[in-house]
């Protein structure tokens, strides 16, 4: 089998647009964090112009940051999966720090910067059960401590629990936070509640999964489509560009679920004519359900060469399902990390995975919220980056800085 070069994608390329936030006013130092929501920053936006584009190619350091030399080369048909501009093949070496973001900024019109010493930021995540979300929480708590903010961090028991998440979002809003961080399980269903936040002049910071709305001032997330394309490229290399590949996706309602599915499928369609990709199966990010799906895929396709799992629970479930099936020679490519995936990669039952920078995502949510409260301009998107890691580079310090257990 050929040696696979690690690839890193950091940075965002986006058309710049200045968006003005109307009717902003902030609470003073003496007001409590549960003051009337009418004192918070407006989130209504209007498009007032455009500028250039921006991009970067580097790697995230231990502070969850990502930046590097301007520009990055995209793999054909990958949707922007970029190769690292540095590092020996197979070494995973890369360097960089700082948050990579588009030049597009969203600024507050008629904004009075908050002087509140301890702003309250309510964060509603897509889940709580996977270590990924615990790592996001860790980053948010760390940045909140650094910046003198108070946060709450909530998420549903399962990443298929759309209504419980919406209920959590309503509860968070009822507490009248100074700012709101939100990762949507359903990119459309949350719109009415986010409109309430906008009307109450509470700035919204999206993370991990975007929403079909311009209400969030910024979105701190991995470019999931490009990351999934990189997973597809790695899978193709690993199975010598031929055979049948299964796909187990965590959901088809969140933006990350759709992007991690579509990025993988689109890359394969554009670049790998000798690889047959089966219809995606959806396991809700649940390990047991994903294991059952993997076993069904294997049973129905004796020639299966590989299976891709689109998040931590999906990937762990695929590894478990392959093991329980007793079928040998199946290449597993995953997404995210966690101890079970780390162990699987080290013992060879999983070939490798894409890791995000969850601590960096959490940090960016809080930092962006605090900036919004101070009426500082925000980029439309903050690309927190991704890495391919496998047995050859898993112990590299740069990889260790962005994987979680």
Image (cartoon, rainbow, N blue to C red):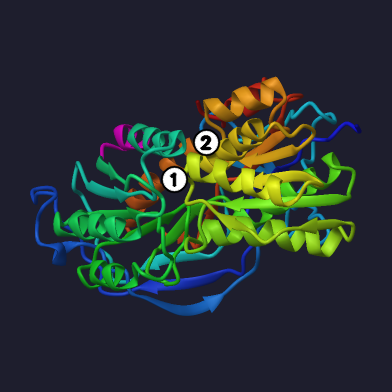
For mark 2, does the 10 Å Cα neighbourhood hold few (<14), some (14 to 19), or many (20 or more) residues? many
Question: Which residue is located at x 81 percent, y 55 percent?
Answer: 75
In-image side of 206 versus 17 (left or right): left
- Real-space CA distance between mark 1 and mark 2, rounded to the nearest whole angstrom: 9 Å
Between discs 1 and 2, the one toward the N terminus:
2
Q: Measuring from the top left, give residue 134's x and y in whole percent.
A: 39, 34
* Mark 1 element type: helix
Q: Quadrant of residue 391?
A: top right
Question: Which residue is located at x 28 percent, y 60 percent?
Answer: 166
Q: Which residue is mark 2?
A: 64
In-image side of 271 versus 104 (left or right): right
Q: How many marks?
A: 2
In-image side of 368 versus 88 (left or right): left
Question: Which residue is located at x 58 percent, y 48 percent?
Answer: 293
Q: Is residue 182 above or below residue 213?
A: above
Region in magenta: 143-149
Determine whether label 1 and label 2 are within 8 Å by CB.
yes
Residue 85 in magenta stretch: no
Q: Measuring from the top left, give residue 195's x and y in whole percent.
A: 28, 72
In-image side of 119 versus 75 (left or right): left
Per the rendering, the mark at residue 364 is 1
Residue 148 in magenta stretch: yes
Q: Measuring from the top left, give residue 400's x and y in whole percent.
A: 60, 24
Q: Is residue 201 above or below residue 232?
A: below
Q: Is residue 303 above or below residue 90?
A: below
- Which corner quadrant holds the N terminus? top right
Q: Is residue 340 above or below residue 330?
A: above
């Amino acid at each position: 089998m050929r040696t696979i070069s690690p690839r890193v994608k950091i940075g965002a390329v986006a058309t710049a647009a200045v968006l003005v936030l109307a009717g902003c006013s902030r609470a003073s130092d003496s007001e409590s964090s549960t003051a009337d929501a009418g004192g918070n920053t407006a989130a209504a936006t209007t498009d007032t112009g455009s500028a250039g584009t921006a991009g970067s190619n580097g790697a995230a350091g231990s502070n969850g940051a990502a930046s590097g030399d301007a520009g990055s080369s995209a793999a054909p048909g990958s949707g922007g999966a970029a190769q690292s501009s540095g590092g020996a093949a197979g070494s995973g070496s890369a360097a960089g720090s700082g948050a990579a973001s588009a030049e597009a900024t969203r600024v507050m019109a008629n904004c009075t910067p908050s002087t509140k010493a301890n702003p309250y930021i309510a964060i509603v995540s897509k889940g709580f059960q996977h270590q990924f979300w615990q790592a996001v929480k860790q980053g948010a708590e760390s940045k909140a401590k650094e910046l003198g903010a108070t946060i709450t961090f909530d998420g549903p028991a399962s990443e298929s629990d759309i209504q419980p998440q919406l209920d959590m979002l309503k509860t968070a809003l009822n507490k009248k936070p100074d700012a709101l961080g939100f990762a949507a399980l359903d990119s459309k269903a949350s719109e009415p509640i986010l409109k309430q936040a906008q009307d109450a002049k509470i700035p919204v910071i999206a993370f991990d999964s975007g929403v079909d709305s311009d209400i969030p001032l910024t979105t701190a997330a991995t470019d999931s489509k490009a990351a999934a394309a990189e997973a597809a490229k790695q899978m193709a290399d690993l199975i010598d560009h031929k055979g049948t590949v299964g796909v187990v996706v965590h959901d088809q309602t969140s933006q990350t679920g759709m992007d991690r599915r579509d990025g993988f499928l689109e890359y394969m369609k554009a670049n790998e004519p000798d690889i047959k990709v089966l219809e995606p199966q959806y396991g809700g990010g649940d390990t047991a359900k994903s294991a059952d799906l993997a076993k069904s895929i294997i049973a129905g396709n004796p020639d299966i060469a590989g299976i891709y799992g689109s998040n931590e629970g999906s990937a762990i479930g695929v590894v478990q399902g392959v093991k329980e099936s007793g079928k040998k020679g199946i290449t597993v490519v995953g997404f995210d990390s966690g101890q079970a995936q780390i162990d699987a990669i080290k013992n060879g039952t999983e070939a490798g995975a894409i890791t995000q920078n969850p601590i960096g995502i959490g940090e960016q949510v809080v930092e962006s919220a605090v900036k919004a409260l101070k009426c500082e301009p925000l980029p439309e998107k903050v690309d927190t980056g991704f890495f391919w890691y496998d047995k050859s580079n898993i112990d590299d310090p740069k990889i260790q800085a962005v994987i979680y257990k």
